[in-house]
Image (cartoon, rainbow, N blue to C red):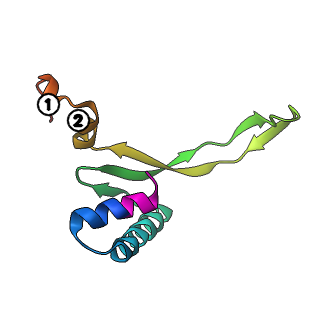
Amino acid sequence: MNKTQLADSMAKQAGISKKQVGIVLNSLTEAVCMSLQKSEKINLIGLGIFSVSKRAGRNGRNPQTGAPIRLLERRIAKFKPAWELSDALNDYQRKGFILEHK
């Protein structure tokens, strides 16, 4: 599903225009990017947690030439899904499993 398809689905479910949903999606994207740039966590209950992690610098190789190169330290975005999302994907409730969340 791409952004346009997501906007179409959201507009249909919420009963609002695609243009309004597009504005909301763009605002959400900007807010998430701005918060992650500040290394803030974003916790969306029922969906998951966005956070920033550091990847250490390391030695690597150029895949075309095989020459050694130095990969710099960098920050990466991480996403940890909420248990509700994981349960929905794995359909535990319908398979008869007992879920215990602490």
- Residue 83's tag is none
Q: Are marks 1 and 2 in contact (CB under 8 Å)?
A: yes
Q: In the rendered structure, does residue 17 fall within the stretch colored magenta?
A: no
- The quadrant of the image that shows the C terminus is top left
Whether 35 is drawn above or below 56: the answer is: below
Identified by mark 2, the residue type is Asp
Q: In the rendered structure, does residue 4 fall within the stretch colored magenta?
A: yes
- Residue at disc 2, secondary structure: helix
- The residue to which callout 1 is attached is 93
Q: Look at the image and give the residue range highlighted in magenta.
A: 1-7
Q: Residue at x 77, y 42 (%)?
A: 70
Residue 33 shown left or right of residue 7 in the figure: right
Q: How many marks can you see?
A: 2
Percent of width and height locating residue 20: 34, 76
Q: Residue at x 45, y 70 (%)?
A: 30
Percent of width and height locating residue 7: 37, 64
Q: Is residue 75 shown to the viewer in this render? A: yes
Q: Residue at x 29, y 67 (%)?
A: 11
- Residue at disc 1, secondary structure: helix
Whether 50 is drawn above or below 66: the answer is: below
19 vs 54, nearest the viewer:
19
Percent of width and height locating residue 2: 46, 55
Q: Is residue 39 shown to the viewer in this render? A: no
Identified by mark 1, the residue type is Gln
96 vs 75, nearest the viewer:
96
Instruction: Residue 82: name its quadrant.
Output: top left
Instruction: Residue 6: name its quadrant.
Output: bottom left
Mark 1–mark 2 Cα distance, whole angstroms, equals 7 Å
Residue 85 shown left or right of residue 101 in the figure: right
Q: Earlier in the sequence, mark 1 or mark 2?
A: 2
- The residue to which callout 2 is attached is 87
Percent of width and height locating residue 60: 75, 35
